[in-house]
Amino acid sequence: MSKYKDGSFFEDVWEVTKLIPKGRVTSYGAIAEYLGSKGSARMVGWAMNASHKSDDVPAHRVVNRKGLLTGKHHFGEFNEMQSRLEDEGIIVKENQIQNMKEVYWDPNIELEL
DNA sequence: TTGCTGACGGAGG
DNA sequence: ACCTCCGCCAGCA
């Protein structure tokens, strides 16, 4: 990503998140690594929590490394996150993405620099 | 200021 | 494959 604008680590996270193609997902750790803060995956999650004010951020496309929808309770409705993913062709069952390998999108690889 | 928490992830048992 | 522990660092009481 470009540099850290206005010192906001969150905005960079949101920018990367917006670049996730429809029907694909990525992980908190992948984004953190892409931003040069490998190991700070938790901060990415925190950034997602703050993304509620930016409606353009498809936070539902960000899941953990196992493909588990750990952040689903942060969406108003209990299965809105799952519904949105399924609507994009992603198979979700028991809060877990079944075809994870097929829909996984890594910014470090796909986005390059 | 200190301590606890958390939408995570990797290492070790 | 499953469970636990530890590092990460921005908010908040």
Image (spheres, coloured by chain):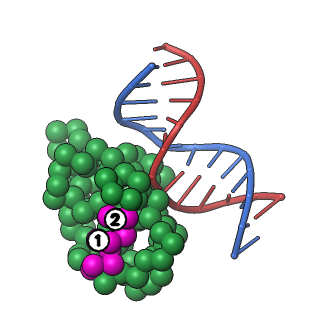
Chain colours: A green, B red, C blue
Q: Which residues are magenta?
A: A79-88
Can residue A86 be found in the magenta stretch?
A: yes
| Residue sitting at the far front | A77
Residue A22 placed where, x, y %? 23, 77
What kind of residue is marked 2?
Met
Locate the N terminus of chain A and report the quarter of the image it occupies: bottom left
Q: Residue at x 24, y 55 (%)?
A: A14
* Majority secondary structure in the magenta region: helix
The crowd level at tag 1 (other Cα within 10 Å; few <14, some 14-19, many 20+) is some
Residue A12 placed where, x, y %? 24, 52
Q: Are marks 2 and 1 on the same chain?
A: yes
Q: Residue at x 45, y 49 (%)?
A: A42
The crowd level at tag 2 (other Cα within 10 Å; few <14, some 14-19, many 20+) is many
Helix, strand or loop at label 1? It is helix
Q: Which residue is mark 1?
A: A84
Dot 2: chain letter: A
Q: Residue at x 25, y 49 (%)?
A: A51
Dot 1: chain letter: A
Check whether the beta carbons of the residues at disc 2 and disc 1 lie within 8 A of each other. yes
- Residue A83 is drawn in which quadrant? bottom left
Residue A72 placed where, x, y %? 40, 59
- Residue A87 is drawn in which quadrant? bottom left
Can residue A98 be found in the magenta stretch?
A: no
The foreground one among A27 and B7 is B7
- Residue C3 is drawn in which quadrant? bottom right
Name the mark on residue A70. Answer: none
Q: Residue at x 48, y 77 (%)?
A: A93
Q: Which residue is mark 2?
A: A81
What kind of residue is marked 1?
Arg
Left or right relative to A90: residue A88: left
Residue A48 placed where, x, y %? 32, 51
